[in-house]
Structures are given as structure tokens and as C-alpha cells.
Amino acid sequence: MATITLSSGRSFEAAEGVSLLEAALQAQVPLPYSCRTGRCSSCKCRVLSGDSVALQPELGLSSQEKEAGWVLGCVRAAQGPMTLQVEDLGGMVLPPARTLPCRIQALQRLAPDVMQVQLRLPPTADFSFLPGQYIDVIAPGGERRSYSLASASTADKTLLLQVRAVPGGAMSRYWFEQARPNDLLRLNGPLGTFFLRPLAGLDLVFLATGTGIAPVKAMLEGLAAAATARGPAEAPRSITTYWGGRTPADLYWDAASLAACGEVTHRFVPVLSRADATWAGARGHVQDVFMAEDPRLSRSVVYACGSPAMIETARAQLLRAGLPEHRFHADAFVCSASVPQANKG
Ligand SMILES: Cc1cc2nc3c(=O)[nH]c(=O)nc-3n(C[C@H](O)[C@H](O)[C@H](O)COP(=O)(O)OP(=O)(O)OC[C@H]3O[C@@H](n4cnc5c(N)ncnc54)[C@H](O)[C@@H]3O)c2cc1C
Ligand code: FES
């Protein structure tokens, strides 16, 4: 066992060969994370002291970041005591992840390449999550993939997913060609730390592309549901959602239907990159449309979800323009298939 100390002063024990993230979660010390496969870089932390070994390739780090001492906690194991600089989620208690059976309740096409999947939990299932989190679904053939939860609660014992068809994808084939209501699946979750941090007095900005709107929808619904319990002092100053697609068919959910989250108005800005001349709305990329409005970044907090390219570009552009780094949160929909053994290093 090695003692891992965070820059906040909290510490936990990590066994040999167990990732820093896994050890932290086992010790109920929540660290930021998303994909758990070394691809998204949400679990990026800086080694201040100590030695560690990569369990899998750190695909989400550039060579400059590696040289500067950054590692990915989800695929790194300690080789002795370590001190790490990382976002402190110390005050948060994450709902425990469980593996549960579930059945498909309904399948509905939301767009030509997007399927809404409604999963039914067992009546006695004890499952709770924070809006914005995701689950892993394990299909009958054993494929396991990650999907964000697209609703804020499980009051009716069902969960909603929004699944985009990836050409040639194993799980896409299942959802779009084979899945039938009542199919028996398994899920593991809730997972990830893409949920809202304290928002008091901040301009809350959501940047989403494609099915990246799914966790944003859950967070907006959660904000609306919590509005009565939330005092004015805890409320954000404003809420704006920028949702990008190529053509109108890609914007398959009426995000404007959530007009207000309690006392705070919700502004929805649809953005298209390949619209024809009849489109009167914003054009281009969500992060450019947001920046063109000359936002006050010093009082903004941004939650970005969807394509890894959008997230990478938005992060670089917004931080360069003055957004504090700890106010940019992201869930990149990277490939969630496990990294092949042959590639591990
Ligand atoms: C935390 C997290 C949450 C996610 N939430 C959602 C969600 O809510 N809705 C959703 O539609 N997807 C989501 N994804 C992506 C999803 O988990 C799958 O990776 C994706 O649907 C492809 O699975 P597949 O089995 O169809 O393709 P695979 O068989 O895994 O891959 C087929 C080919 O497509 C490539 N590929 C895989 N994934 C992607 C991708 N995302 N973009 C481009 N190319 C890809 C692979 O490299 C491979 O070459 C999420 C991913 C993560 C990590
Ligand atoms: S790279 Fe570690 S959680 Fe994604």
C-alpha cells in the first residue's frame, strides 16, 4: 500500500497495480473522471512528488503534458508514496456505482441516427445518480459501452439514454438493428463526475454537440426540479445552452421547452454548421457562437459535452480568453470500448 496525498491535504491508500482513480474511489475520495480508459483526460493530475507506472497508454495527454509531470489517474498506479495536484471534490459524496439487470422498456428514433433508449430497472432496485452522470450498458453479447443519462431522476424506475449511431460500431449495430423491447441487459453506474458544482452568482453555460445534449438535458431538468428548494443566493445568474449540429434534424430535442429553471431564465441557442439558406439561426461551432457574444468569462462556468474535438477546441479557446481553468468541466464522448491488450504499455 502507498499513501497518496492530494494538494488539498486529503489522502488515501493505493494498492500496487490499482489505478490512482480506482484507489481514490474505493477510499471514497472522489476525484474528477469520465472515460476511465485514458482517452478523455478528465482525470488529469500533476505529480508533485513520487513515482508511478502507466497501466495503459495515456492517450489523452500530449508529450508536453507528460514532460510537465501530468498523468492520467485512471490508468496510473503508484509505486510508492505520491503527492498529487488535482481538483478537490472533497465535499461531494458520489452515489455508489452498482451493477444491475435492466430491460429495454422502449426504443424511439429521435433523429435518423439517434435512438432514445428507455431502460426499466427492477422494481426493488436502489439506484440514484447526479444529473450529468453516465452508466455503462452491457449488452447480451457482452459489449460494454458508456451512455449519459438523459433525465434527471429515476422516480418511475426507468432511465433514458440518447444513442448516436457510429458507423461500423458494435453497440450501434445492437441498438439500431437488433435491440427489442424487453431485452435483458445489465448496467453499471452511476459513473463520472460531470455534474453541477456550486453555481451561486455565475453565468452557467452549456456547450453541447450531438447526443452531448443528453446530460445537459438531465442537468437542466435537475435545476428546474431543485429550484424551489434552492435559495436565491445559491442560484446561477443566468443559464444558456448552445447546442450544435450539422442540419436541423440533428437538433432533435426542443431545448427551449425548458424556458425557466425556477427564478432563472434559460436561453437556448441552436447552432448549425451545414444549414441551408432557410436557416435563420446561428451558424458555425458552439464555442465560436458563445465567444462572439463577448461573455464575461470571469463570472462564467462552462459545462461542455459531446465531440472530443469541440471540447478540446473550446477548452483551449476559453481558457486563453480568460475563463478560470477550474470553471471548465467536460464529458468527452470518446470511444468507450476497452483499450485492446496488445496496445497496453
Ligand atoms: C463518458 C462517456 C459517455 C458517453 N455517452 C454517450 C451518449 O450519451 N450517447 C452516445 O451516443 N454516445 C456516448 N458515448 C460514446 C459511446 O460510449 C460509444 O463509444 C459509441 O456509441 C460507439 O460505440 P460502438 O460500440 O457503436 O462503436 P465501437 O465498436 O466502439 O467503435 C466503432 C468505431 O468507431 C470509432 N468510435 C467509437 N466511438 C466513437 C465516437 N464516440 N466518435 C467517433 N468514433 C467513434 C471507434 O474508434 C471504432 O473505430 C459516451 C462515451 C463516454 C466515454
Ligand atoms: S482519461 Fe482518465 S477518466 Fe478519461
Image (tube, rainbow, N blue to C red):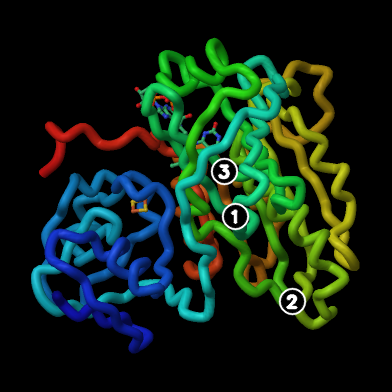
In the orientation shown, which residue stands out farthest toward the bottom?
Answer: 9
Q: Position of residue 163 (x, y in %)?
A: 58, 29
Q: Is residue 284 visible?
A: no
At 80% across and 33% down in the image, what residue appears?
A: 281
234 versus 168 height, above or below: below
The tag on residue 148 is 3
**Residue identified by numbered label 1:** 127
Q: State which tag comes first along the sequence, 3 or 2.
A: 3
**In the rendering, which numbered label is found on residue 201?**
2
Query: In this picture, is 112 found above or below 273?
Result: above
Q: Quadrant of the N terminus?
A: bottom left
**Mark 1 and mark 2: span between their CA atoms?**
31 Å
Q: Viewer-nearest of labels 3 and 1? A: 1
Q: Is residue 183 left or right of residue 191?
A: right
Mark 3 sits near ligand 1, with its Cβ under 8 Å away: yes
Mark 1 against mark 2, which lies toward the viewer? 1
Residue nearest the viewer, comparing 272 with 140: 140
Instruction: Please tell me which of labels 3 and 1 falls first in the chain.
Output: 1
Label 1 residue SS: loop
Which of the 4 image quarters holds residue 336?
top left
* Secondary structure beneath label 3: strand
